[in-house]
Amino acid sequence: MGKILCATRGGEDSQRTQEAAIALAKERGDDLVFLYVADASFLDRIAAPVVVDVESELDQMGRFQLILAQEQAAEQGVAAEIAIRHGHLRTELAAAAREMGATLVMLGRPQGRTAVFDEADLEEFAAELEERTGVGVRVV
């Protein structure tokens, strides 16, 4: 039995990735973890009290998105864990994959203008993630 780590930002753009992770976990009998990385680095030049408020809001938003994914998995008979990490996606996803003992990381393909990566950057990131962690990466 393996462990699938599904990186998600939540919302409509992540739905396809979450559904694929749930289906694969169910098919293979793997554990499933939905991961949200809260990256507040864009706030580096803003006053500290504001940063604390925004970081808290990012956490709450992330937790809400993860709970929705967890409930979706439960509706399909798959128990899923959730995890929130703080920092840069590239660093935190690699660290989480290693620390959690993931056997597969699932990433979503870029969709629309809200995408974090374009297609080429995503493929490069997936290859780098596999190399750094030794964990397979599937882009859906």
Image: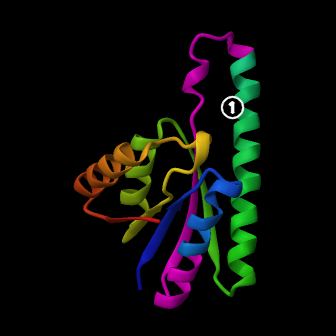
Q: How is the image coloured?
A: rainbow
Can the viewer see residue 102?
no
Front-most of residues 114 and 27: 114
Q: Quadrant of residue 39?
A: top right
Q: Which residues are magenta?
A: 22-49
Q: Is residue 49 above or below residue 16?
A: above
Residue 109 in the figure: left or right of residue 10: left
Q: Quadrant of residue 26?
A: bottom right
x 56%, y 51%: residue: 111
x 68%, y 14%: residue: 48
Could you say where residue 51 lies in the image, as x and y percent from the top left? 69, 21
> On the rendered image, what quadrant is the N terminus found in?
bottom left
Number of callouts: 1
Front-most of residues 125 and 110: 110
Residue 112 inside the magenta-drawn segment: no
The three-letter code of the residue at mark 1 reads Glu
Could you say where residue 29 lies in the image, as x and y percent from the top left? 50, 88
Find disc 1 in the rendering and name its residue: 55
